Image (cartoon, rainbow, N blue to C red):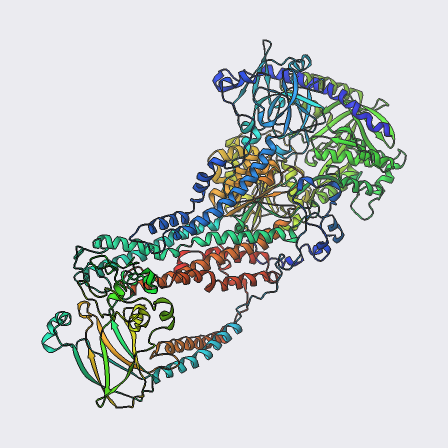
Amino acid sequence: MPKGGHVDDYASMGEGLATSDEKERAWGQISETEKGDDNVRGGPAEDDDRRSGAFFQILDSRFTQQELPACKPLLTPTIVISTFALIGILFIPIGLASLSASENVVEIVYRYDTECIPQQSQDDKVAFIQSSATDKTCRTTLTVPKNMKAPVHIYYELYNFYQNHRRYVKNRNDKQLRSKEYELETTNCAPEATTVDGSPIVPCGLIAWSLFNDTYSFAIQNKAIEVNKKNIAWQSDKDEKFGSDVYPKNFQQGGLIGGAKLNESIPLSEQEDLIVWMRTAALPQFRKLYGRIETDLVANEQISVTIQNNYNTYSFEGEKKLVLSTTSWIGGKNDFLGVAYLTVGSLCLFLALAFIVLYLLKPRTLGDPSYLSWNRNPDRH
Amino acid sequence: MELQTFTPSLEISSCTKQENTEKSHHITQKGICLDQPFPDEDNSRLVYINDPRRTNHKYEFSGNEIRTSKYTVVTFLPKNLFIQFHRLAYIYFLVIAGLNQLPPLAVFGRTVSLFPLLFVLFVTAIKDGYEDWRRHRSDRKENNREALVLQCGNFVPKKWKKICVGEVVKINADESIPCDMVLLGTSDPNGIAYIQTMNLDGESNLKTRYARQETISMVVEDTFTGLIRCEHPNRNIYEFTANMEFSGKIIPLGQSNIVLRGCQLKNIEWIIGVVVYAGQETKAMMNSTASPSKRSRLESYMNRETLWLSVFLFVMCAVVATGMGLWLVRHLHQLDTLPYYRRKYFTNGPDNGKEYKYYGIAMEVFFSFLSSVIVFQIMIPISLYITMELVRLGQSYFMIEDRHMYDIASNTRFQCRSLNINEDLGQIRYIFSDKTGTLTQNKMEFRRASVYGKDYGNSHQNNVTTFETISEGELEEPTKQSEINVDSELLALLQRGIEGEERIAAHDFFLTLSACNTVIPMGKKYSSPNSDNKAVEAGAIDYQGESPDEQALVIAASAYGYALLERTTGHVVVNINGKKTRLDVLGLHEFDSVRKRMSVVIRFPNSSVKVLVKGADSSMLGILDVEDSRNTKVKQPTENHLVDYSSHGLRTLVIAARDLNDAEFSEWQARYEEASTSLTERSTKLRQAASLIEKKLILLGATAIEDKLQDGVPETIESLRQAGIKVWVLTGDKQETAISIGLSCKLLTLDMHQIIINGSSEDECRFLLANAKAKYGIKSEQSRDGTLKSKKKYDYDIVDCNDEKRTHGILITETGKQDPRYSGFTDNELRLSCEKYAVSDDIPLALIIDGNSLVYILEKDLETQLFDLATSCRVVLCCRVAPLQKAGIVDLIKSRTSDMTLAIGDGANDVSMIQMADVGIGICGQEGRQAVMASDFAMGQFRFLKRLLLVHGHWNYQRIGYLVLYNFYRNAVFVLMLFWYVLCAAFSSISAVTDWSSVFYSVIYTSVPTVVDNISLSKFKNLLAHYSPYNDFGIASSLSLHCDPSDFLAF
């Protein structure tokens, strides 16, 4: 394989054809056979004037000739180093900002699933939770670590509950939820589709059936704090996905009670707990909004919490947590974003510095073909 | 003058008559000597002349309908689907779509999941259908042409496709032959016919065919009967063996009695023949191998990658399935009531306790596997195939519209006939090129002459203007007549009176040019508007001959005032400066490859007898009269001129003459008469007769003819070579011609070692190959010994390192016959490496091989040896190769390397090569459309190849490569994300994103980089200015390395 070689400028190949008045000529037919002798002028194609005999019109636009302006950045050391440095300089502040925002979020997390089972029932939690006779009320006190500005969001957090399971996700019927006329529509809802006599369950399906039914109430110094349970669901869900004329029917009347019961006089679009629940979580550990406390909480205040521990997570080793949290501009408490920004930013900065050092210590000319793989290894042809 | 223009045409018939009676007579004799070719009838085909019914009664001979298309209306769907499903990915997606139809698995909508596949299949089918429809159309056009067929005693027009074996067909002048026919008679009383076989072998000169004397009577009497026994259809266009039973006699028929489909009848009013092979069984059709569906290298690569991806996919799905199994086992006791699983019904009714959509762990695992296949299906990019088709369409558009590849002369732009292999253009490593019409314009031009030691015509500036008008006129017609640059000095010399040695030499020189040849002057119906006498003459007489070189010489002679007007076997009439002179031709020794010269014995009007000789310099310089004072004076400068000419790539001939005294003449005449009537060893005897007079010649001068190259050929070859592409030339021309063309287009350079293989038996070839390999393969010093010997023996010519020889002035002389055993080879071979050069690796090698040797090499196990040798040479020239051999050579490389091959040619003889190569390019030349029809791309000029390969090929490859890589990367990212999510969803195969997001993922979210990159690439052109094409090409080839699974997994 010959090395080097001469520079060849393709732009100059057949340059003579470039400019001109071609557009005046009509489009030609592709017909080599029909070409007349008088149109064949012969000779090499260098001469501008000879083009006048052409049948074909070659569209002489910059697009068809692929001469549109464009730039292909060469990865020179300067460009690479400055790009890395720029990314580093941009990302580190963003990371720091997100991290501090996340730090400012005040969060109280309380896991209650085991604690809310009386001592004598610890051995058989499932029996306790399934029994209708037991008192499932559970009281505890939480201390506010820092001032929490309203609104304070109340979440329940479940763990090891696969709301994203394929069997579960599909087990609903959006048509039925949306409108009364599709009340009979219970496809995909088995085994919670119909009652024994065949009348449809509204809302049907496993998701609705397993509706979370623990309740929380809060008090500070015996003074109850109001929990606002309005507007905890997405407005679009309320407007579009859940019909205001659809009323619960035959719900939770099967052989196995999955969770909460619904008030049959309230349309689905106003059953916000259901709507929140039916927006299934992506991961097996998830939080769902329970309500909001519209008053500020002062540091070191003691909140007494009353929990109705109804929901059965014990049969599948699930966990239940109560979460009180404020929000900031990045949402809830989440260090990940800040850490990610910081990591990438510092990595880029480090690379930039490393390249600078490398460039100063061991510089080489750009575009040296002898570094190319097929030149380093001359055996390969 | 006007009158004279037409007289030759009248004379021709009479002259040809004599010649042909002689020739056919000769054939008859030869035929009788032959053994009966068909002793048993099973091995032959029986054709009853003018009795097609009986002919076709027993055997179903194929009709004359031809079909180059792949599909018919009925077979289109199954066949097209079959071909399409060669793509692994299609099968894969068919399986996926099938799986999705199963109820427990349905991840996506059932019918919707079929749409992508159906769409892709549909679009491709439409495209294939359109391409095939165009083929159908051209077939129909061909099939519906008409020819005159004898029916009930009259010749009536009949469509080509209706013609069947055994019918008698009449062809008029300039018509194409519809099928292979045995000549029965022609308008010429002697049964001679001229045909042009350009479509078959690419040679544009006329060939003569003869009707048997016996059959001519048939035509005269209008009774067509008889039985032809001929061999079964085969693809050998140079052979035909048959015999004819006719009124009790058995007449042998040979190659010279058959006219083949695709040829054109020329210079004769009509011929009548009987059809022996028709349609697909004609030799022309047998030679065109079925056009295979070409698939690009990248695509096969992609198919392989797809296989790897499937393995990867299998692993992922296996992980998911295993996870699912483990999870189920662990939660087995909870499943019944698990709120997000709920295996059982809990109702108060009959369903109570029944299991809901649960088929046991094993089945669940299996289903989980299948459904995860469906979820991860995007891993294998079906859309990529359709995207690639679209991208290729766009690329074709850019190539077609490229003004740098638009040929103004023939008003053709680039044509993309195949849309599948655009990117292969960027990976070509071997180019196989036809010579005639591809590298050269097939126009011979008389360029320079050395007369009496003086060089004429070396400066183009002082070319005389008188013929310019003619040249322009000639260009308007695609004839082979060439532009003649008349040297004014030489013309002035000729215009002087006949006195002085130089003048006499010049006179004899041009006389030799016009008389010593086999060219037949023919009147042309074309009269030049030019009133100049000479011009009219030059333009008005059309010289027809087997050799374009001779034509060029005769035309040149006429331009200098020595116009050949008539030729018969007995005399020639030459117009010497306006004076018609009749010269008796007493004998003619035709050119043969042993003597490498031709001589003619002429009696002048003043009864003096002269022998005029022209021949290759190697054979001529040795037989000059060393004692003659004129020779000693002229020889040295002439030799210098010869070296000069050949270094310019011109084809040289040495001209010499000699007066014969009565004794010599009568001795020769006796031998000549005896030899020409001899039945055995005629050629040897003739050769001996020739050697009587071809000696002690007086050197007159030398001629230099240029086989005009197309524009930009040397530059293109040079750039291609710098890009690391090997250019091989495969030509039907003879060896010397091929070498001189090789030199003039810079394919061969003077510093190259030429290895020449031309054996006439398998053993010889084996020996030559082994020898060459031993010598050049190993870096050996031994070959230096004994290189000083220059010897020549054996009938096949081991070639003379032409260039070195000339440089050093060493002549190769025949040292007589030596032991004709193979022991002699060593010396011969050693001689090859002429003394000056030590054999080492850095000296470029050139391999020159001829068609005969290829017959032995390609059919035997010598292929490997040839391959080894050929690949270590920088240049390979194959001469005298038949169309299928061209394909064989391409196949040699294709089957043994993974390198991409490209074949470029313009004639029908290149079709099989074009179809065999990975990429076939047709030149829209003068030699018909077959090459273009068979090609993948077609263009007007050879030089466009540079831009096509180095610019478009690079772009296409880079862009498609980028597209494929990006697609694989993008899909991998997506699938790995899905995979991670499935792990988080208790191994239940659920898609992490909504359906719309999946769609937008590829269409919108990830399309930006592709668009940006492709636009930026446009301007890459500017960068090309800074890169040599070679580096540029390297980038492309490095890209192919990127496409491997390890890189892919690294994503």
> Is residue B59 shown above or below A95?
above
Residue B924 in view (yes/no): yes
Which quadrant is home to the N terminus of chain B?
top right
Q: Residue furthest left?
A: A120
Q: Residue furthest top?
A: B248
Q: Quadrant of residue B181?
A: top right
- In the picture, measured across the screen, residue B896 lies left or right of residue B636, that is left
Q: Give residue B891's position: percent from left, percent from top.
A: 50, 40
**Residue B850, image x and y in percent?**
58, 36
Which corner quadrant of the image does residue B317 belong to?
Answer: bottom left
Q: Is residue A381 visible?
A: no
* Residue B1015 point in image, percent of width and height: 56, 62
**Which quadrant of the structure image shows residue B787?**
top right
Is B966 left or right of B249, judged from the image as shown?
A: left
Outermost right residue:
B497
In the figure, is residue B503 to the left or right of B1008? right
Q: Looking at the picture, tell me which residue is in the foreground, B488 or B597.
A: B488
Q: Residue at x 73, y 56 (%)?
A: A21
Q: Residue at x 22, y 56 (%)?
A: B356
Residue B783 picture location, percent across and down: 54, 43
Relative to B888, residue B271 above or below: above
